[in-house]
Structure formats: structure tokens, C-alpha cells
Amino acid sequence: MEDLDIKKIRKILSYKGRSDLSDLLRSSVSHLDESGSFGSRWYSILSTFNIKSPPSVQAKIDKLSHKDKEEIFKALLLVYPLKDNAPEITEIIYYPDFDIEITELVEAKELDRISFEYIHDQIKKCNAKIAEKDYDGAVTNARTLIESICLFILESKTKQKHEYDGNLIKLYKSVASLLKMSPGDYIDENLKQILSGVFSIINGVSGLRNIYSDSHGTSPSKISYKIDDRHAILTVNLAKTITEYLFLSYEKSQ
């Protein structure tokens, strides 16, 4: 479960337009260390706020500018404002915690070039929901990510608005035909198998999302199975990889 103070700080940072800092603290935990000394207000207690992060995250925090760290401190002061009979926080101390587990997800850096912001939003949501252990939600956003890249390609290539009916398989087939990515377009049997595998993955993501994700209600007979971390992580990683592959194929076709 996400640390409550960190969660509040991240919400404030996101509200202030610093989603980059908010995302950086996603896996961090905190601890308030109160001293025995009184502060500047009536019975306020001088305190330090400790933020512990996985080593890989700490390395990024160490490289933050003074201005960025000041933004985090300002967000913290909105969580713990200066008042009587309360902690008076004077500084944040950052240090690594080697016991914090962090899930490493596939990065889709090629997608940084895409102008469709909705794609970036879905990637962020996939990452956030895996970190928050919302595996049903992660699968939902994984499918939405694939849908979004397909619609982007289809409308960019045809220069027409596409009325999407929710049939992801049909949507992907249209995009594969436009980009000449159908298995039948290739002679090499290995490529045919790979492209058939892409279709199978999309079919699986579509079905998993429809049956087990949080996009629909459920019945008592289905409640016995809940998407676990390994399946959600696999689904998100595959969705990112396929989305990046489709975008690269689109660029090549241009």
C-alpha cells in the first residue's frame, strides 16, 4: 500500500504541474522524525522528514537540482503546515532503502516522439497502477494503450475520423493491413510466426481486459480469480512493446 504522506505529496506535485517529481517518488516511503526541541510556534516540535527510496530511484533524486528539491519541500509543507502543537519540519533527508521492492517495467522510449498526448497518459497510468498494485486497472490501461496507437495510426494514414466500436481485433487488423504487417504479407515463416504472435497477444489482452479487469462489473463465478502481479506486469510490458512496434512501423511507412 502506498505511503499516505508520500501519496499526498505526489498529488500536490501533480497538481502543480510537476508530474515528473510525483512519478519519481512513486516507490518511496517516508518517516517523520520529531526531535525534543520546540520550534517557532506554540509547542511546535522541530522535525525532519525522511524519504527512503529504492537505490535506482535514489540515484535520480541525488541528481535533482536545488529548485526541484525545493518544490518537493514546498509540497511537504502543505501536508504539514506550520502551526501550534504540530511538527515543524525543517528539512527532508533522502536516503536509499535496499529492502524496498520495485517493479522494473519495459520502457518505450521510441514513443517519446509521438505527439498524441493520450498515449503518454496511458503509459503513465499503466506504470502507476502497477506500482499501486491496481492490477485490474493496469490491464485496462494496457488495452487502452493499444487501442490508442491503432486509432492514431488509422486516422493519420487515412486522414479520416474513425468511429471505433470497441472491437480491438477488427481495429488491429485494419492497422496491420495499412502497414502491411499481416502474416500473409511476408514469405519468411519466422516473421509470419512473430506477427501471428502479435495478433494472439492483442487478442489475449482484449479478452483479459473484457473478462477480468475493472472496466466491467463481475459475477460471483468470476470473483474467484483476480489478476495477479505477474500477469498484469506481463500484459503491460507486452502492450508497451507492441505499441512501440506499431509506432515504428507507422514511421517507416511514412
Image (spheres, helix red, strand yellow):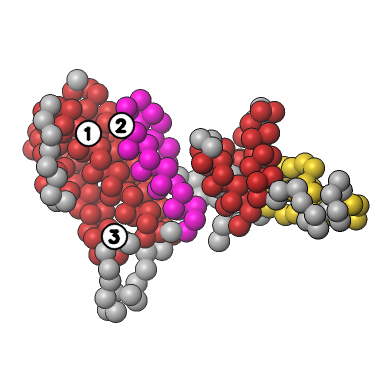
Q: Position of residue 14 (x, y in %)?
A: 51, 41
Residue denoted by label 1: 152
Of labels 1 and 2, earlier in sequence is 2
Q: CA distance from mark 1 to mark 2?
A: 8 Å
Q: Position of residue 47 (x, y in %)?
A: 81, 50
Q: What residue span does the magenta drawing correspond to?
A: 106-133
Does residue 205 lie above or below 66 as drawn?
Answer: below
- Label disc, if present, on residue 215 of the rendered structure: 3
Name the foreground residue: 190 vs 237.
237
Q: CA distance from mark 3 to mark 1?
A: 22 Å
Q: Give the residue at x 34% y 33%.
A: 117
Label 2 crowd (10 A; few <14 / some 14-19 / many >=20): few
Residue denoted by label 2: 116
**Residue extending furthest toward the top:** 254
Q: Position of residue 225 (x, y in %)?
A: 34, 72
Of labels 3 and 1, earlier in sequence is 1
Q: Which amino acid type is shown beneath numbered disc 1?
A: Phe
Q: Which amino acid type is shown beneath numbered disc 3?
A: Ser
Q: Give the residue at x 84% y 49%.
A: 41
**Can residue 188 be spotted in the picture?**
no
**Picture quadrant where residue 31 is located:** bottom right
Answer left or right for 232 relative to 64.
left
**Picture quadrant where residue 157 is located:** top left
Q: CA distance from mark 2 to mark 3?
A: 23 Å
Q: Position of residue 156 (x, y in %)?
A: 18, 27
Answer left or right for 33 relative to 64.
right
User: Label 3 near label 2: C-beta < 8 Å?
Assistant: no
Q: Where does the N terminus fall, quadrant-wise?
A: bottom right
Is residue 114 on the magenta stretch?
yes
Label 1 crowd (10 A; few <14 / some 14-19 / many >=20): many
